Image (cartoon, helix red, strand yellow):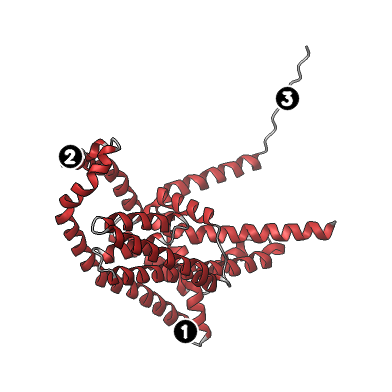
Amino acid sequence: MNGENKVLDISWGTILKIAIASLFFYIIYLVKDILVLFIFALIISVLFNPAINFLQRLRIPRVLSAIFVYVVIFGILGLLIYWIMPAFVSEIQQFSQFFPQYFEKISPPLRSLGITAFESMENFTKALGDMLQKASSDILNALALVFGGISSTLFILTIALFLSLEEKWVEKVIGLLTPKKYESYVMYVWEKSQTKVSGWFGSRLLASLFVGVAFFITLYLFNVNYAISLALLAGILNFIPILGPVITGVVAFVFIALDSWLKAAFVLVALVLINQIEGNILSPVLTKKFIGLPPVLVLLSLTIGAKLFGVLGAILAIPLAGIVFEFCRDFLKKKKETEVRTV
């Protein structure tokens, strides 16, 4: 069998391109932590830009518009934390005092299922301690990666503010990196996706606020203990489609049933009604002009963001996924239209 000698001919230009690409990815690897913080800042600026642009159209200078939006949003967030945190801490302390009584109520049925952790208070405390010790390193590492203390949080907010102060800076970068024949199309999709995703994110915040407040009023009317904690849980988990309301319902029912099964049933029915109003009336009204993200995409974004970058990653992964989804959807739509015209 005759073999042929094959010579792999690689030009110096190709070697140089490979070397430059390798150096680029190596630099990206070295600064990956800073790059993550920058991406978070970028997403925050993208979410706030529509509000800043709106104020700018009212002839308010962009610097004042940006500062006003950041101060108002984070000011409201700070006030909510200031008002809620003392009551939340008080409820946690109250729960810890009454936990032995709750344990005596819930342990018999769980012991009958063969769960050894509920055979005694000592076993439960030991199992809980082991679980917390096992999870603490991952949680602390995630928090350290995302926040890295006050300095990283300030870094994210400062970069986000500076990005918001610069008008259309993303569009300028897109213009530099995009081929001329695709520039107008990419710019159009970017502006549309930015507006839609920001609107969707804002509408989800409003919907979650509605669920939290409505559930708190319900718990207050039924004189339920830990009303603030359960309402806060309902509002936060409402961001998670399908699973969030289910988890809230299970947790609320178990806690309230420790006091009264009948009260727990009424509250569960009220929670179902609140979620029906939010899902079938409020959300469609708020999001009819904005992009509707598939629940699977939201769940994947939350899971991947939380796994990589903790709580902040879970929250900010949703708008990032929304922008990518809008780009892909618009690209596939245009490709299909082109194919139809060709046929």
Residue most extreme to the front: 262
Q: Which residue is mark 3?
A: 6
Residue 153 is situated, as x and y percent measured from the top left of the image, at 33, 62
**Cα separation between marks 2 and 3:** 75 Å
Q: Nearer the viewer, mark 2 or mark 1?
A: 2
Closer to the chain start, of discs 2 and 1, is 1
Label 1's element?
loop
Q: Nearer the viewer, mark 3 or mark 1?
A: 1
Q: Quadrant of the C terminus?
A: bottom right
**Cα separation between marks 3 and 1:** 66 Å
Q: Is residue 21 above or below residue 40?
A: above
Residue 249 placement: quadrant = bottom left
Towards the viewer: 248 or 192: 248
Check disc 2 and give the amino acid type: Ser
Q: In the rendered image, is residue 178 in sight?
A: yes
**Cα separation between marks 2 and 1:** 65 Å
Check disc 3 and give the amino acid type: Lys
Residue drawn at 39 percent across, 78 percent down: 67
Circle number at residue 61:
1
Residue 267 is situated, as x and y percent measured from the top left of the image, at 34, 64
Q: Nearer the viewer, mark 2 or mark 3?
A: 2
Residue drawn at 47 percent across, 63 percent down: 43
Q: In the rendered image, is residue 168 in sight?
A: no
Q: Which residue is mark 2?
A: 120
Question: Is the residue marked by circle 3 packed among few (<14), some (14-19), or many (20+) residues within 10 Å?
Answer: few
Q: Is residue 85 left or right of residue 243?
A: left
